[in-house]
Amino acid sequence: TLSFGLLFAMPVMRRTHINQEELTDRAAELEVAVVTDPLTGLYNRRYFEDAMAEYLTEFNRIGAPLALLMLDLDHFKSVNDTYGHDAGDVVLKELAMRLRALTREHDIVARTGGEEFCIVAPFAKVEQIRPFAERVCRAVADMRVDLGSVILRPTISIGVASTADGLTTTRDLLKLSDERLYLAKETGRNRVCA
C-alpha cells in the first residue's frame, strides 16, 4: 500500500509544484505588463504617475533635488501620415532604446502618451539637469532610423522643471515642464527649455 501511495502521490505532488511555479511566473509577468508600455518596453503613464508622486513625497521630506523632463517628438504626426504607423512604431522603439541608454538606473523613463515621454531624474541638481537634457536632445537628433526605403532623423523638444524651481507637487512639476515643452516647440523645436 505504501508503494502504491508513493507511486500515485509523487507525480501528483510534482505536477502541483510545477503548476504553482507556472502561476507564480505568470503573476510576475502580469505585474510587469500592468506598468509597462507594450510597444517600447518603458514604464507606462500609470507607473510614472505613481512613482513620481512617491519620489516627490520622499524627496520633499529629505530636501533632495528632483527634476522632471517632458519630451515630445517633433512633427511625429507627419511621420505616421507619410510613412505609416509601422514606421512611427520603429521610431518610438528606437527612441526608447536611446533614452534607456542615456539615463541612470534609478531614473524613471516612461512613455506617457503617443509620442510623449517623461524622465524623472532624482538627485539631479540644477547645474546637471540642463546639460543632461541637452545631451538627450542631441542624441535623439543624431539618430538615424532606417526604414529600408528612407532614413528618418527624428528630433525632440524637451521641457524641464525641478524642485529647485520651488515646486513641491506633482501637478506643479507637470504643469511647468509642459509649459516649457510648448515654449521649446514654439521657439523652433529640437531644443530644451529649462
Image (tube, rainbow, N blue to C red):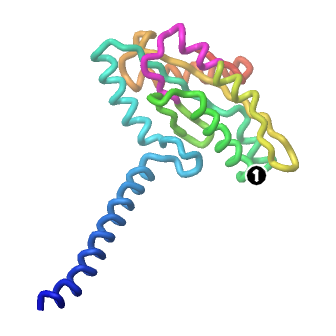
> What's drawn in magenta, residue-wise?
119-134
Is residue 133 within the magenta segment?
A: yes
Q: Nearer the viewer, residue 11 or 133?
A: 11
Could you tell me the amino acid type at mark 1? Gly
How crowded pointer 1 is (Cα within 10 Å; few <14, some 14-19, many 20+) is rated as few
Q: Nearer the viewer, residue 182 or 194?
A: 194
Outermost residue, front direction? 3
Quarter the N terminus occupies: bottom left
The residue shown at (61%, 39%) is 96
Q: Which of the 4 image quadrants contains residue 95?
A: top right
Is residue 23 within the magenta segment?
A: no
Horizontal and vertical percent for residue 36? 48, 47
Q: Nearer the viewer, residue 19 or 34?
A: 19
Left or right of 163 in this view: 38: right
| Vertical relation: 58 (above or below) 90 | above
| Vertical relation: 15 (above or below) 176 | below
Horizontal and vertical percent for residue 118? 53, 31
Outermost residue, top direction? 127
Horizontal and vertical percent for residue 169? 36, 22
The residue shown at (38%, 61%) is 26
Left or right of 77 in this view: 168: left
Left or right of 104 in this view: 18: left
Write down the residue under mark 1. Answer: 84
The residue shown at (43%, 46%) is 35
